[in-house]
Amino acid sequence: MDETSELKKQTAGVSNDESNEKGKYMTFKSGNEYFGLAIQYVNEIIQMQEITAIPETEDYIKGLINLRGKVVPVIDVRLRFKQKPLEYNDRTCIIVVNVKSTVVGLIVEKIAEVVEINEDNILPPPKIGHGEKAQNKYVYGIGKVGSAVKLLLDPDKLLNDEDLSVVEQANDMNMEEEGEV
């Protein structure tokens, strides 16, 4: 996974310097589209690992992982966007993000690159009828990168209130463990 290692180097330490983050996006592939997440939300990128399923949750909430002793809920981005499920492979990885003061893992098909997109190259998403693609409600802008476009995600919208209860339960588990140590 050389590509992932290289991207880890690009993002390592970035979250400590906010002026360095402005306009930088971690891009990844889901289906036929490329999405971007503002780099300030990205904690790290990890390889797929064993996921413990949580009964009676949405299908896109794949379960929980143990990340250096912390319990982290993971969401399959493809399923969240109501795309066809894809079998995980050696390019599948988890982007660990911090959303609304909670840590969540996003399972993505393939990491693309870290790109810089100036604000003047970000357009608002097209206003299309509500019966359109599910992922459009998570997109806050369209970033132009050369001749390509990246759909820029609002990570806050990836999680709904029900998802947050799963995340809060995981956080409660982390707090209890820290209290016992």
Image: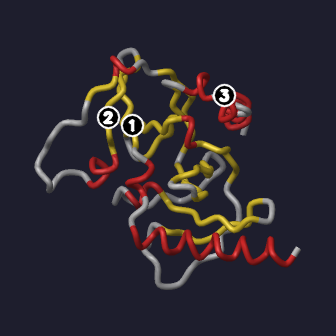
**What residue do we see at 74% from left, 30% from top?**
9
Compared to 172, does 151 lie above or below?
above
Which amino acid, by three-letter code, is at mark 1?
Leu
Question: In the rendering, at what x and y percent does residue 114 appear?
Answer: 56, 28
Label located before the other in sequence (2 or 1): 2
- Label 3 and label 1: CA atoms lie apart by 21 Å
Between 131 and 101, which is closer to the camera in this rendering? 101
| Image quadrant where residue 124 sits | top left
Which amino acid, by three-letter code, is at mark 3?
Asp
Which SS class for mark 3?
Answer: loop
Q: Residue furthest bottom?
A: 56
Q: Looking at the rendering, in which quadrant would you find the N terminus? A: top right
Which SS class for mark 2?
Answer: strand
Label 2–label 1 contact, CB within 8 A: yes
In the image, taking residue 34 as reference, residue 39 lies left or right, namely: right
Residue assigned mark 3: 17
**What residue do we see at 57% from left, 63% from top?**
74
Question: In the rendering, at what x and y percent does residue 8 appear?
Answer: 71, 35
Residue assigned mark 2: 141
Question: In the rendering, at what x and y percent does residue 142 appear?
Answer: 32, 31
| Disc 2 residue crowd, few under 14, some 14–19, many 20+, Cα 10 Å | some
Label 3–label 1 contact, CB within 8 A: no
- Label 2 and label 3: CA atoms lie apart by 24 Å
Residue assigned mark 1: 152
- Which mark is in front, 2 or 3? 3
Label located before the other in sequence (2 or 3): 3
**What residue do we see at 51% from left, 62% from top?**
75
Q: Residue furthest front?
A: 179
